[in-house]
Image (spheres, helix red, strand yellow):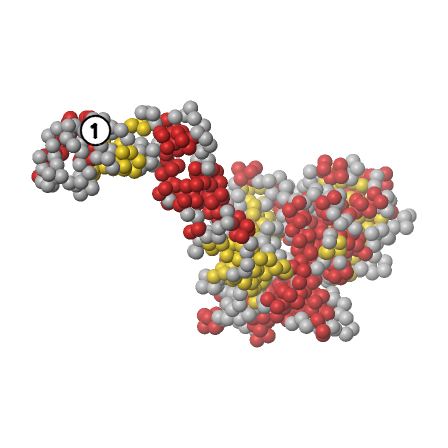
Amino acid sequence: MIPLPIDEFLPRIAQSLAEHRNLVLVAEPGAGKTTRVPPAVLPVIEDSRHRGVIMLQPRRVAARAAAARIADERNWRVGGQVGYHIRFDRVIGRETRLRVLTEGILTRQLLDDPFLDGIGCVILDEFHERSIHIDLALAMLREVQRTVRPDLRLIVMSATLDAEPVTQFLDDAPVLRVPGRLFPVDIEHRARPPLGQLPDAVCDALRDVLSREPRGDVLIFLPGVREINSAIEAAVPLAREHDMLLVPLHGSLAAEQQFRALQPAAKRKVIFATNIAETSLTIDGVTCVIDTGLARVAGYDAQRGMDTLSVQRISQASAAQRAGRAGRTAAGRCVRLWSAKEHHQLQPFDKPEMARVDLAATVLALHAWGANDPRAFGFFESPPQHMLAAAERLLWMLGALDAGKITPLGRRMLTIPAHPRLARLLLAAADAGLLEAGALIAALLSEKDIVRDDLAPPSQRRARTRADSDISLRIEWLERRDPSLDRAAVAQVLRARDQLRSAIRQPAVADRSSHITVEQLPLLAFPDRLCRLRDREKRTGTMVGGGGVRLAGESAVMDGDLFVAVEARHDPRAARGESLVRIASKVDSEWLEQFFPHLLRRETTAEFDASRERVVGVSRTLFVDLPIADQPNAAVADETAASVLAEALAPRARELIQRDERAANLIARIELLRTVMPEHPWPRFDDAELRDLIRQCAAGKRAAAEITSAALGDAIQSRLVYPLDRLLTQHAPEWIEVPSGNRIRLRYALGQPPVLAVRLQELFGLPATPRIAAGRVAVKLELLGPNFRPVQVTDDLASFWKNTYPQVRKDLRARYPKHSWPEDPLTAKPQAKGGRRR
């Protein structure tokens, strides 16, 4: 075996494990912990009844590679002393003591056998990645250790880890630190390119590396499959020039294709990989890493029940892991496509999956474990409460939980190595004798979309205009080998179909009485994504939970009011915050009654019809909280109608009162006196008080038109306790008697003096401006000519008679000779109508 830094620490690891139950091992990249520590643990538990060792790996390719590497170093055989067990692939024999598992496999093993019989030690490798399964495994193992297996040993291993919290969780377990790589790695930083220019930037860096490094394979980290394919396409000329092999490495590839990237090749090799190659894998011959510093990170929108996938910057810990791939077998180089300044701004560690992904499978496992309240479970770090609640809500909708307890259906779902959504679909399909179709649909739902519209001729794309289900269309295209299909994605879907089909123990005789059809299966998996179309032309609708959705142009679902959003992505940058639905499937309302009667409810509500400004009754059927059918003109109690009317009109209270002349005038009178006569307790008509006025007036009413001017006036007057009502009449009168004997109404407006619009002749003999509010406010006079149009506005009548009237008299006398225009208006007799000329 090649000597590795971990080798001299193996005796201390064995001794520590013999003296303590738990150990935290922090070994830098290249130390060799993954392949050397598990075999070193075997002698420690040799004399125990539990002689087996399990090592957890976060990825399937890493689990297979680790088992193969251990076997090669020890001259063992995979399936002999060492084996592996991953989803749909198990190579373990009777003599296997060291098992390399992916984390979900261990969770199922713990549910089947909580005593973990035969296992003396569990090693959790690459703990820094904080996958949802490794966090759950650590918590479950800790509970097993504290209750039924105090002899169980636990080792937590990582290259980059804040060890203190883990140590405390494991009862102050000792921490052992091991130096890393055997060879130095030079770090070089470059400017970060825009995402759209990533392939060109990668090729520029690769060209530079090839000019400076004549030997050694190159490992390039990219965020996803799309970017890998684009970069490989851009690098083809370089590969021809330098006679190189371009190899992809990502989780969607078949096992043999993944191993192709790991094995030595006759040519110089350039490996384009996702973060699948970040940890646990030693790729012999790699001496240079080109790191884009990006990863496609899975998340979950708990409010909308939708998975998210976004390109994000990696953490400093991930960057260190990636750079470490270059120094495993020789001195290396790491070219980072971001600046040194940006590097210091990166987060130290990745955010745990438990805090950002769908927890439905985890919560279902906890209920099967006996933890009926996941909030009280002993997590290493508790997930957000709202995400636990969202998971329980989905499981209840799927029928896996009822009244907070796992159901028989929920226990059946746990036997299937798939998300609870797909497990529900597969079980229903198997029970109805539709397993073949169900497995294919589940595979289409779980894997990368097989459709690539850019591969199909335009004529064929236009022909795809209308269908009940985008899933059914994909099945049809599969059968006829449509040219728009992505062949690699099709191969992955067919593999997943076969694996899912083999995971189901189909009943000997299918229950054909269940009346389930293939078209109904997507609804069984996604009841929380039921949508109702609200605008057929714009193809927009509402989803369970209230979120807005919009059918994408490539979706063929155009008929019907109800559909399931099978693949939806929420874009917070969208103008209306709608989620875009690329893959949908039509739903008949009868199916909801058939499969989810517990999610249906009917209620009668009173609503305000804004177009008619009146309250109407609606009898409504809801699926959870989504209205799916309305029956108008339902009976509504008077009290309820009045309350709905009041709440609808209250926000418009000021507008409604200002629209009514009498009410607006009355409030303006009160507000005037509140300002100029503050010694009295006048009511304040702020927005809250105006809303109360509207609520008072709405009593016994059903429509805005029923709230009369008289009702508004009475409501306002009711706020004036004695003697304010008398003072209002006295000091802010509705009208004033002028010298002609006429009573003329004053015009009040908020924040302005009262206005008296009066014909000039009616004021003859009045020496000064009338005043109100105990003489504190002068009335603004709007002096009108014989045509009742203003000729002058003034609040100083005496000045008008003296200075302005002579000119006004001259102008108006010529225009209106039949009217009285005396030289001395103060001694003239006031005229109510036009009089003889003087």
Residue furthest toward the bottom? 480
Q: Which residue is mark 1?
A: 766
Q: Position of residue 292 (x, y in %)?
A: 55, 48
Asked whether residue 829 appears in the rendered view, the answer is yes
Residue drawn at (63%, 65%), measured in percent from left and top?
592
Residue drawn at (59%, 74%), measured in percent from left and top?
479
- Give the quadrant of the C terminus: top left
Is 519 above or below relative to 144?
Answer: below
> Which three-letter amino acid code belongs to the residue tagged 1?
Leu
Q: Position of residue 713 (x, y in %)?
A: 41, 41
Residue drawn at (63%, 60%), measured in percent from left and top?
600
- Residues 477 and 367: in front is 367
Q: Position of residue 825 (x, y in %)?
A: 15, 30
Splitting the image into 4 quarters, where does residue 10 fall? top right
Q: Position of residue 301 (x, y in %)?
A: 59, 51
Q: Give the left or right position of residue 513, taking residue 766 as reference.
A: right
Asked whether residue 66 appears in the rendered view, the answer is no
Residue drawn at (38%, 32%), measured in percent from left and top?
728
Is 448 above or below relative to 321?
Answer: below
- Residues 369 and 604: in front is 604
